[in-house]
């Protein structure tokens, strides 16, 4: 009897494992590109997704030097949110229902190229979807470059967390959280500086890195990759996770410029960066071995030129995230670019990745975002271009 039970258990275990074996061998799906705007602006700085019209489907939102546009799902008809209503250049955007009316609003960073001007504002809609939106002042930050929402202060309501590109005051960049006031249209937004000691911070990520249910911030700067967490007494605790690229002769050749967090199968976190800022390397950091503090760095590609956009998503549905990497210039030592590539982990541990070029020369990638846009269960992605000025959707045809 016990022998038959043991055999049955082994058979059941094999049946459970078979889908995992299949998924581990999944190939990168075919992607079909569609241009939804050939010339959105002189520079398409940022792209995000949000349900603007309330139909439960995410629309595409693009930031250019002087406008914010949204493209209505599923026909991708362009509409204007704002046009020449902020200081030039607009550079970053973050969707959230700021005033609590059940409709999406946007925080927006502008004026970033002027050292002493950078402005933080939020946008509320007009009377109809065809009207221009209203601009409400939040604050100022020189060199303002990136913004994301997250409750790093543990108040129960997300804050707008911003990072400038360059040193602003004191020793470095002011990573700052703005709290939404009771009346966001008229009341001042309280600013809490989380850190002010790093330089050339190109981007930051907000989410739950360690799975403890609390908001974390991961930064990419000239000093490397750092984790910011709220301590038990409310203080912000900073810990270095990676050193980034190392160039002792040139500060611009050090550290990291882009950062995202992804998960391998089994919910094992990893970091992916472009190094250094606007650099040529794609690096993946995996959790450190026992007794080590720094995460283990793996350079998986060193052929980019001006790497500038990073996404993570499980595009092949194998239970492990892939890397989606965009660069805006043609690589000098390869026949690729500018464009976008996907990297698929092949060793299960995050050290070895296979590269597949998705777009070779069709977009000078400045930013990208990944999500299932048509509800077919496969993750698509959207990218916007710098020198190419365009906006493209890449449809995941993995289900074909």
Image (cartoon, rainbow, N blue to C red):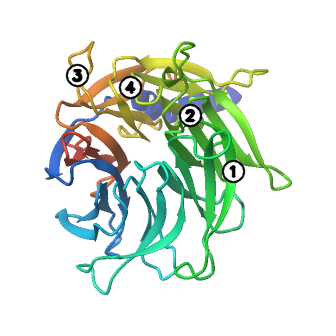
Q: Nearer the viewer, mark 3 or mark 2?
A: 2
Residue 209 seen: yes
Is 83 or 103 nearer to us in this picture?
Answer: 83
Does residue 26 appear in this view? no
As drawn, the label of residue 221 is 2
* Residue contact at pointers 4 and 3, CB within 8 angstroms: no
| Residue 325 coordinates in the image, percent (x, y) | 36, 33
- Which residue lies under the disc numbered 1? 194
Considering only order in the chain, which callout, 2 or 1, is on the residue closer to the N terminus? 1
Q: Residue at x 52, y 47 (%)?
A: 164
**Could you tell me how far apart the alpha carbons at marks 1 and 4 are, in whole angstroms?**
43 Å
Disc 4 is placed on an element classified as loop
Please tell me whether mark 1 sits on a helix, a strand or a loop. strand
Identified at 69% across, 24% down, the residue is 294
- Residue 131: percent from the left, percent from the top? 26, 80
320 shown above or below 62? above
Which of disc 4 and disc 1 is earlier in sequence? 4
Q: Which residue is labeled 4 in the image? A: 25
Label located before the other in sequence (3 or 1): 1
């Amino acid at each position: 009897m016990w022998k038959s039970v043991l055999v049955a258990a082994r058979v059941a275990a094999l049946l459970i494992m078979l889908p995992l074996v299949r998924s581990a061998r999944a190939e990168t799906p075919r992607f079909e590109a569609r241009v939804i705007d050939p010339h959105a602006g002189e520079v398409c700085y940022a792209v995000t997704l949000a349900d603007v019209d309330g139909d439960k489907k995410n629309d595409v939102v693009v930031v250019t030097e002087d406008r914010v546009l949204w493209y209505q799902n599923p026909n991708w008809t362009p509409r204007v949110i704002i046009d020449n209503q902020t200081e030039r250049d607009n550079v970053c955007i973050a969707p959230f229902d700021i005033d609590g009316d059940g409709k999406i609003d946007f925080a927006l960073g502008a004026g970033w190229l002027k050292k002493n001007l950078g402005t933080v504002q939020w946008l509320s809609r007009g009377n109809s979807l065809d009207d221009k939106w209203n601009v409400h002042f939040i604050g100022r930050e020189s060199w303002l470059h990136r913004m994301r929402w997250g409750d790093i202060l543990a108040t129960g309501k997300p804050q707008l967390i911003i990072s400038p590109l360059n040193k602003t005051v004191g020793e470095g960049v002011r990573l700052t959280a703005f709290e939404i006031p009771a009346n966001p249209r008229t009341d001042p937004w309280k600013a809490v500086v989380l850190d002010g000691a790093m330089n050339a911070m190109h981007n930051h990520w907000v989410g739950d890195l360690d799975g403890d249910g609390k908001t974390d911030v991961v930064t990419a700067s000239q000093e490397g990759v750092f984790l910011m967490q709220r301590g038990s007494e409310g203080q912000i605790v900073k810990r270095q996770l990676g050193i980034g690229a190392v160039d002792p002769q040139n500060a611009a050749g050090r550290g990291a410029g882009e950062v995202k967090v992804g998960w391998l199968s089994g919910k094992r976190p990893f970091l992916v960066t472009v190094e250094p800022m606007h650099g040529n390397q794609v690096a993946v950091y995996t959790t450190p071995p026992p007794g080590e503090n720094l995460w283990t760095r793996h350079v998986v590609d060193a052929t980019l030129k001006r790497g500038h956009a990073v996404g993570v998503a499980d595009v092949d549905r194998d239970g492990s995230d892939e890397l989606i990497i965009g660069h805006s210039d043609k690589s000098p030592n390869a026949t690729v670019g500018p464009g976008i590539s996907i990297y698929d982990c092949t060793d299960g541990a995050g050290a070895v990745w296979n590269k597949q070029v998705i777009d070779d020369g069709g977009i000078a990638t400045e930013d990208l975002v990944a999500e299932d846009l048509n509800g077919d269960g496969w993750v698509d992605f959207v990218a916007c271009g710098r020198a190419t000025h365009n906006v493209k959707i890449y449809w995941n045809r993995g289900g074909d």
